[in-house]
Amino acid sequence: MQLAVLFSLVASVLGANCANSSVVTRAPTASLQILSYNDVYEMKPEDDATQHGVLVGGPSRVVPLVHTMRKNFENSLVIFAGDTMSPSLWSGQFKGLQMIEAHNALNVDFACLGNHEFDFGIDAFLNVSKASKFPWLNANAYEKATGQLLRETTPHAVKTLTSPTMGTIKIGAFGVMYDMKDDSKGMYWTDPIAAAKEQVKYLREVEKVDMVIALTHQLWDDDNRFSQDVKGVDIIYGGHDHSAMLQSTFGAWYLKSDLNFRSVWVSDIKYYGPSTEGKNKFAPFIKQSHKNLAITGDMPTDEAFEGVIATYEAKIATLFNRVIGSLCAETDLTKKAVRFGEAPIGNFFADAYKSFYGKVQVEVGVMNGGGIRTDKVWGANTLTLGDVVSWSPFGDMMVAIKTDGANFKTFLKFIMNASCGERVVAENGYFAHVAGLSYKIKCLGVKNAEVSELKWMSTTRTGDVKDDDVFHVVTSENVKGQFDQSGAKSTFVVSPNEASRVDMLLEEYIAALPDRSVCPKVQGRAEIIIPSTN
C-alpha cells in the first residue's frame, strides 16, 4: 500500500470527484473554509526561544486564526478529529477538562472520539462531553453495560451554512474510530467501515445533504482502506498518526495534522450543485484545496486564552504540593544507586510499569536507571505529586509490547553491555531494573555482556525464561527504542499513540498501595558478575 504523502507547505489540487475541468468554469453553488486539527494534549506551546520559527503549537496561537476565519468566511467550520483527554502532565490532574477550554475557545463544530478519550474511564469522558459546546460524533463505540453508543455522543450531525455572498450548503458529518480491542475500558467497537456506510446512507438518502464529511481516528493505512471502501464521503479529517499528511490516492481525500497544534489544516471547499441547464446535465461535485499551516512562535497569541492558561498554571502549582503518599524508609535515587546495580527505587518503577495496563496480562516491567533523576537520597517522609514527577521528569510514554524469551535476551544483552567495564561494573544509563523476572549478567570483557541467567519471578510462571516463552512487557518509549536497536523483535500491544505518561502511571500505582506507602526493597532481581582478577 502506497505511503501517504506528507505535506509541510501547500497542497492545492483539483478535487478527485470533479467531473471535468470545463465544469469548474461556472460559479460555485456555495463555498466554505474549514480549519481542522487532531491529537492535542497540551495547553502550553512547545516553545524554544533559541530557535526562531520552530513549530511551537499550542491553542492560544490558533484561536486568533479561528477568529479571523469566522470574520472573513461566513461559511466556515472547525473540526477536531479526536484525542485530547490525555496524555499530559495536566491531564493527570484535570482529567482532560482543561483541554475542553481550548476546544470551546476554538468554537469547534464537530469532534470525534480518539483512543485517549477512554484513559480515565467512561465517567470522566461524560464530564468532558458535558462541558463541551460541540457534539462528539461517534457511530461505532459502544458501552458494554448497555449495548448502546457511548453516552453524550451522537453518530452524526447536520449543519446548514448560509451566506448571501458564499451561498448555502447542507453538510452532514459523522465520526468513527478504530477498534481498540481493550476489554478494560468497558467499551466495545464495531467495524468503522460498516458503521460509516450506514451513516453515509442515512445522510445522503434521509437528510439529503449536499456534502458528507467523515471524522476518523485511526492509522493512515486504515484511512487508506476507509477512503477506498466508503463511497459517498467527500472529505475525511483524521487523527491518531501525529504527523501532518494529505492522501488523495485511493478515494475520498483525507487530512491529518501534527499533534499539539504544531500545525493545522486550512481547507477551501467549493461546492457545485447539480445542474440541468441547457444540454449539459451533471451531478454535484466539490473542488478543494488545502494548506498545512505551521503554528510558530511568530504568530500572535490570544490574550483571553493566555489568561485561561495562567489560571491552570496556578492550579497545577498548588496540585504539585498535594500529598499523594509516603516513603516508608530512606531511599537512594543517586546515580551510584540506579546506574550500577539493582536499586529499591528501580524495582518500584518496574513494579509500577508491570501493574498498570489492563488491556492484557503484563508479565514484565523494565525501567532504565538513567530515567530516574534527582541524584539524591530521599528521607522517609510524605510524597507530593511534585516529588514523584521529579523522580522521572521527562514525561515518558509507557508502551506495552509482546515478545519472547529469545528476543528479550537479545535486548537485555544489548543494553547491559555498557555495565561491563575494565574489571568493574561501569555506569550504565540503561541499567535494566526489572519486575516479573530476575537476571544475571556475566561480563566477558569491556562492553561485552552475556545473559547467563534469566528466571521468572512470578506467581504464574516459574523456572528459567525459555526462548519460546511469549509475554508482555511494559517500558518507556525510550527503552523500546533500545529494544529495536538491539535487533530484538516485538509487536506493540499499547503503542505510543495509545500510551499513558509515566507520572500518571506512578500516581495511580501509589494510590493502589497499602496506606499509599512506597516501600521498595532489593529482591535479587539483577546481578552483574565481573571476571576474577586471579
Image: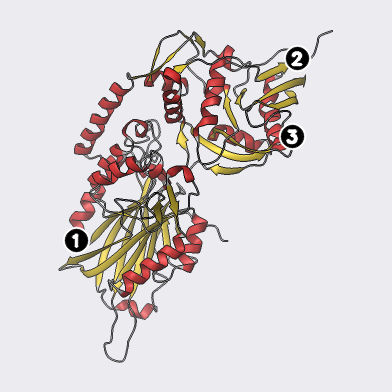
User: Label 3 sits on what residue type?
Assistant: Lys
For the N terminus, the image quarter is bottom right
Residue 40 location, quadrant: top left
| Disc number lying in front (2 or 1) | 2
Q: Is residue 61 visible?
A: no
Badge 1 local density, few (<14 within 10 Å), some, or many (20+)?
Answer: some
Q: Name the residue under label 1.
A: 74
Q: How many numbered markers are drawn?
A: 3
| Disc number lying in front (3 or 2) | 3
User: Label 1 sits on what residue type?
Assistant: Glu
Q: Tell me: 311 left or right of 211.
A: left
Q: Tell me: 452 left or right of 13.
A: right
User: Label 2 sits on what residue type?
Assistant: Ile
Q: Are marks 3 and 2 in contact (CB under 8 Å)?
A: no
Label 3 sits on a secondary structure element that is loop
Residue at left offset 33%, top offset 30%: 93
What x and y, as percent, mark residue 16?
Answer: 42, 71
Q: How far apart are marks 3 and 2 (CA)?
A: 25 Å
Q: Name the residue under label 2.
A: 530
Label 2 sits on a secondary structure element that is loop
What x and y, as percent, mark residue 192?
Answer: 45, 60
Query: Disc number at residue 466?
Result: 3
